Image: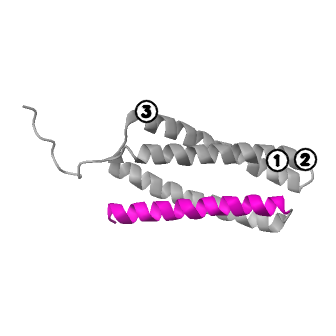
Amino acid sequence: MSDATLFTLFFAALGVTVVLLVVALVLAHRHDARGHIKAVVGFVALLLVTLYFAEQLGRRFTFAETPKRVHLGLAFTTAGFLLVPLITGVQHWRGRMRRETHSRLALVFLLLTLSSVVTGVWMLSTRTPLAPAGSAAPAPG
């Protein structure tokens, strides 16, 4: 797959992922539990697809160290934090947690997600292609 195709697939998957997250938030605001749950399932599925393409980009490019460290630290934190609104959502659905608690924690996840997207774009802006496999670096001097 060409780099251009990979970038297209990555940004398409990322775009659909973000749209599904927004749809989940709108449906939650409208108290449409079934629609909200379906949108969350779709969001998580597309997030996995997006992460696959991100990993493929990481295998083809190198990135400036500071944006890479900032983005990866934030992205791993965000991915781990995804469990919090999922768990609190199930607890709320079962009547074991107030909606406000779940909503506040989902807002934290949303802010982490937006921060991950912004730092990801920053990191991608510093990309340099890796040398093709099997190519030797020129001998020094």
Q: Verify CB contact (< 8 Å) between mark 2 and mark 1.
A: yes
The mark lying in front, picked from 3 and 1, is: 3
Q: For the point 65% across and 61% down, which residue is it?
A: 43
Q: Please state if 109 lies on the left or on the right of 10 as rendered.
A: right
Q: For the point 85% across and 43% down, which residue is it?
A: 101
Residue that carries the numbered disc 1 in the rendered image: 102
> Which label was assigned to residue 98?
2
Residue 34: quadrant of the picture: bottom right
Secondary structure state at the residue bearing disc 1: helix
Quadrant of the snapshot with the C terminus: top left
Q: How would you rate the neighbour count of disc 1 (Cα within 10 Å): few for under 14, some for 14-19, many for 20 or more?
A: many
Q: For the point 58% across and 64% down, which residue is it?
A: 16
Nearest the eye: 10 or 56: 10
Residue that carries the numbered disc 3 in the rendered image: 66
**Number of numbered tags placed on the structure image:** 3
Between the C-alphas of marks 3 and 1, the distance is 33 Å
